[in-house]
Structures are given as structure tokens and as C-alpha cells.
Image: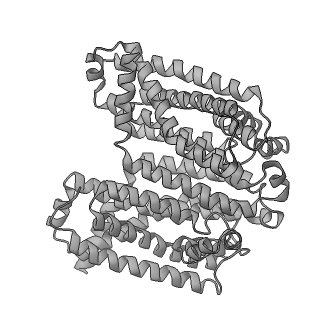
């Protein structure tokens, strides 16, 4: 446990080295919320407003999840860099078992996402409303699962790409598909309706339904806005996503650090 | 004639460098596809009926301008790469004047952004259609000035700051606000309804001039911001381009030598 905590501390210290990146991300998240969402508030049709109360309230949980995703994904960039520069040889020389090493990196990535996301979640509570204490703990638990899954996904991508360019391209693909094919920007029911009307292909609708970002954002909305209603499938999606990528990332990381 | 040749050599070098960034080109292509195929398509079903009829086309045209902007900004990052690897000193040793160097880099930045958005514009024309080729030609010429101006702006900031970290922070913040406070994503009438301050900032934003011009060029005339068109938007872009070209030449000449890159 102590070894894992040391690794988390190591990764947290690394995280604060990316001050410029954090400032850019914060600006983008705040601009999305206080400019884009405020303007979309005026553009959204009355039928959609009936579903979401206001676009601003609807989007605030979405931007929290976006921030969580981007910051938890950062660990992959560092691991990719370590692999390319062979820093993993140094990591292997530390008095830490390999499994502790893999778990420490995975948890650190998730916790960094949680830390970055906290002010955004607080902003969401301030502008939309506060949940009850049990709901608050469910939100935190769900977001931790999401952050760990994202950290695992980024480690798995980082370990399976040999160059930084390939990692960046794969990251871009994952980012955009998961962001835009989710309920972060628009209600899931709208995506489902477009699927029924034949505007969107059915696989896209299924992807949006199973997307952990949809589940994370909708879970916060269910407690703060009451719509969509809370469903156990949201927690199930997050748990499955987190479990799959935690296992995949652990094995991928173990494999990559043992390379000659 | 000799000066022109030197200028062209600088332009050619920047064009060749850009083609090395294949991963960046792939990334922006994925971004464009996701913006159009997901966000544009779904958001068009979410907006008020009066806007819904044109919103998809309106948004696609805005995404073209955003892509052009982000490609033009990239030259600033190139400058840092060169400073970091000591290529700057090599450039200074060449028989090319400072003015030629900065003008060549701005032109190169503009042209390569245009090459980059060429396929994007072609896809957009397939989606939207083309109503008046002369209007489109005027719009594209004005958009070149826009790309040229943005490259000049990026060079000015990069050379003015001489710090990779500060440049990254400033560009990150600037990109976040300049795109959202423009008419690339939404018409000015809705920005006005949301906030008069946002609307005033959006009205003088070069991205608003560029988006309006491109939409006018492809025949999306509903919700245009500037009247009379295209005069006002072209005038805005000419001012933007002249200001930043002048600034970039002056600042580049003054700040280029003496090291101090961080």
C-alpha cells in the first residue's frame, strides 16, 4: 500500500509540472460553460428545454465529465514518453513489485482526474444545485470509477503505441468519438430519436448508450436535475468500463515494462 | 526579383515542414469529421425551428473557419521547435533579410493552412452546394488574408513572449475564448440575447468576419452579421491582416536576436 501511495505521489508531482496545459484546459472548460452553454441556452428549442430544464444546467455536469476525461487521460501521455525514453528500466529498479507499479500508475491517473474535476463539480453544484449527502457519495464513487477506467484506457493506448505521433492520433480518435457520441452535449433521448428516424446509424446510438461518459454525465444530472431518471444501468456501465480497462491497462503496463 | 526569390524560398521551407506533421493532419481530419457528423448533425435537431433549417450548413461552414484558424496558429509552435533545437541561429545566418524571413513565414503559414483546409472546403461544398462561384472566390481570397493574419498573430505572440510555456498558456486561453466569442458556432442574434458584452466582443472578432465571408461565399445568407456584405467583412479582415503583418515584422526584427528563448 505504501509503495502504491509513493507512486501516486510521484504522478501527482508530475501532474503539477503541466501548469500550462492545466491553464489551457481550465480556460476551455470555463469558456465552454460560461460562453458556449449560455449562448446555446438561447438557441435550444422549447421541446428540448422541457427535457433538460436549461442548456446551461444540462451542460454543467457534461463539462465536469469532459474535464475529468481530459485530466485522467494525461497519464497515458507520460507513460508513452517513459516507454519511448526507456524510463521504465529505472521504474523496475525501484523496490516496488511490478503489480504495485501497474496499480499505482492506474490509480494515480484516476485520482489526478478526480482532483482536476473537483472545482468543476463544485461549480456544477453551485450553478445547478447541491445533491443530498448519499447522492454526493454516489456521484463521487461513480466519477472515481469513470476516472480509473479512463486512466486504464489511456495506459492501454500508451502501452500499445510505439511513437508519440501514433499515441496522439489514437488519443484524438478516442477523445472525439467518446465526446461527441455521448450525452455530454445533447440529451441521450435526442440521439435515440435520431436513431429511430434513421438519421444516425444504430451502432452510433448503441455506442452513445453504452458510453461511460454518457453514464457519468447522466448520473450527475439524475440527482441534480431529476432528468434523466437514475438507473442502475448507469452504475453498471461505469463499473464494467472501469473493470475492463483496469485489467487491460494492468496487463499492458506489465508487458511493456518487462520489454528489453 | 532577388528579394522575391528569397521570400519564396522561406515560403517553400515552411510548406515542406508542414507536410511532415502527418499526425496533426490526421487529428484535425478526425476532429472535423466528429464535429460535422456528430455535433453538427445532432445540434441541428436541438435548436429552435427558425434556426434548425440552416443550422447544419451554418455550423459546417463555421467548422471550416475554426480548422483554418487552428492550422494557421500552428506556425508559432514551429518557431518554438526551431528555437529549442537551435535552428533559429541557422535561419539568422542565411542571406535573407529579417523582413523577408517574417513575411515569408507569414505567407507560408497562410498557404499551408489553405492547403490543409482545401479538402475540408471541398467536402463542405459537397455538403452545402455552391450557389455563386464569384462570391466563393472573393470569400476564399479574403480567407487567405485571414490565414495570413492569424499566422502573423501567432508569430508576433511567439517571438514577443520567447517562452514556450507562456506561449502555450496564452494560445490555449486565446483559442478557448476567440472561437467561442465569435459567430463560428452560433449567429450573432443569439449571442446578443445571451449577453451584450459577448455580442460586442464577437462583432469585432476576426473569426466572425471570416465565418460571415465563407457563409456568404457558399450562399448561406441567413443570419449574416455584417452589412453591407462582403465589404465590411473584407475590410475587417484587411485591417486584421495589415495590423498583424506590421506587428509581426516589427516585433520579429526587434526581438529575434539576442537569444533569451525559454
Name the residue at 68% across, 43% down: A130
**Residue B135 locus on image (x, y percent):** 63, 78
Instruction: Indicate the quadrant containing the N terminus of chain B: top left, top right, bottom left or bottom right.
Output: bottom left
Quarter where residue A240 is shown:
top right
Name the residue at 17% across, 60% down: B90
As drawn, B196 above or below B12: below
**Residue A234 locus on image (x, y percent):** 71, 29
Name the residue at 43% across, 52% down: A23
Residue B122 shows in this picture: no
Quarter where residue A4 is shown:
top left
**Residue A163 locus on image (x, y percent):** 37, 35
Residue A171 horizontal side relative to residue B35, left or right: left
Residue B49 horizontal side relative to residue B166, left or right: right
Q: State the residue lying farthest toward the front.
A: A133
Name the residue at 63% across, 30% down: A137
| Of residues B233 and B130, the one drawn nearer to the viewer in this rendering | B233
| Of residues B165 and B65, the one drawn nearer to the viewer in this rendering | B165
**Residue B125 locus on image (x, y percent):** 65, 63
Residue A203 shows in this picture: yes
| Of residues A137 and B190, the one drawn nearer to the viewer in this rendering | A137
As drawn, B91 above or below A158: below
Amino acid at each position: 500500500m505504501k509503495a502504491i501511495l509513493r507512486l501516486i505521489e510521484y504522478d501527482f508531482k508530475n501532474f503539477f509540472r503541466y501548469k500550462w496545459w492545466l491553464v489551457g484546459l481550465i480556460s476551455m472548460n470555463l469558456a465552454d460553460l460560461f460562453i458556449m452553454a449560455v449562448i446555446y441556452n438561447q438557441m435550444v428549442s422549447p421541446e428540448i428545454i422541457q427535457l433538460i430544464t436549461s442548456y446551461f444546467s444540462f451542460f454543467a455536469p457534461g463539462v465536469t465529465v469532459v474535464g475529468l476525461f481530459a485530466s485522467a487521460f494525461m497519464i497515458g501521455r507520460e507513460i508513452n514518453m517513459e516507454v519511448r525514453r526507456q524510463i521504465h528500466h529505472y521504474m523496475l529498479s525501484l523496490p516496488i513489485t511490478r503489480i504495485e507499479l501497474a496499480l499505482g500508475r492506474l490509480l494515480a491517473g484516476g485520482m489526478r482526474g478526480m482532483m482536476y474535476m473537483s472545482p468543476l463539480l463544485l461549480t456544477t453544484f453551485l450553478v445547478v444545485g447541491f445533491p443530498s449527502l448519499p447522492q454526493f457519495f454516489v456521484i463521487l464513487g461513480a466519477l472515481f470509477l469513470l476516472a480509473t477506467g479512463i486512466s486504464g484506457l489511456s495506459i492501454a493506448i500508451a502501452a500499445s503505441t510505439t511513437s508519440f505521433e501514433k499515441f496522439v492520433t489514437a488519443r484524438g480518435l478516442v477523445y472525439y468519438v467518446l465526446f461527441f457520441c455521448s450525452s455530454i452535449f445533447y440529451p441521450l433521448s435526442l440521439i435515440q430519436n435520431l436513431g429511430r428516424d434513421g438519421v444516425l446509424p444504430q451502432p452510433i446510438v448503441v455506442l452513445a448508450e453504452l458510453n461511460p461518459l454518457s453514464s457519468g454525465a447522466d448520473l450527475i444530472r439524475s440527482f441534480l436535475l431529476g432528468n434523466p431518471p437514475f438507473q442502475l444501468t448507469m452504475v453498471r456501465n461505469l463499473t464494467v468500463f472501469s473493470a475492463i480497462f483496469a485489467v487491460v491497462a494492468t496487463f499492458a503496463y506489465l508487458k511493456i515494462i518487462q520489454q528489453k | 526579383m532577388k528579394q522575391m526569390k528569397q521570400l519564396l524560398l522561406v515560403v517553400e521551407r515552411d510548406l515542406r515542414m508542414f507536410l511532415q506533421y502527418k499526425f496533426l493532419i490526421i487529428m484535425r481530419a478526425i476532429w472535423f469529421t466528429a464535429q460535422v457528423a456528430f455535433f453538427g448533425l445532432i445540434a441541428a435537431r436541438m435548436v429552435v425551428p427558425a434556426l434548425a433549417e440552416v443550422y447544419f450548413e451554418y455550423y459546417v461552414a463555421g467548422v471550416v473557419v475554426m480548422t483554418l484558424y487552428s492550422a494557421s496558429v500552428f506556425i508559432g509552435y514551429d518557431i518554438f521547435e526551431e528555437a529549442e533545437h537551435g535552428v533559429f541561429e541557422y535561419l539568422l545566418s542565411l542571406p535573407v533579410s529579417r523582413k523577408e524571413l517574417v513575411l515569408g513565414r507569414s505567407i507560408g503559414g497562410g498557404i499551408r493552412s489553405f492547403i490543409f483546409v482545401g479538402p475540408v472546403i471541398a467536402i463542405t461544398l459537397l455538403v452545402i452546394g455552391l450557389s455563386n462561384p464569384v462570391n466563393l472566390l472573393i470569400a476564399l481570397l479574403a480567407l487567405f488574408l485571414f490565414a495570413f493574419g492569424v499566422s502573423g498573430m501567432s508569430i508576433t505572440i511567439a517571438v514577443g513572449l520567447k517562452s514556450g510555456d507562456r506561449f502555450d498558456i496564452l494560445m490555449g486561453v486565446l483559442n478557448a475564448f476567440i472561437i467561442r466569442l465569435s459567430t463560428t458556432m452560433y449567429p450573432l442574434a443569439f449571442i446578443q440575447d445571451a449577453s451584450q458584452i459577448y455580442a460586442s466582443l464577437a462583432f469585432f472578432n476576426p473569426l466572425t468576419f471570416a465565418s460571415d465571408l465563407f457563409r456568404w461565399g457558399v450562399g448561406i445568407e441567413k443570419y449574416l452579421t455584417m452589412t453591407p456584405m462582403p465589404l465590411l467583412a473584407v475590410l475587417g479582415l484587411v485591417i486584421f491582416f495589415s495590423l498583424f503583418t506590421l506587428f509581426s515584422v516589427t516585433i520579429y526584427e526587434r526581438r529575434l536576436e539576442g537569444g533569451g528563448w525559454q
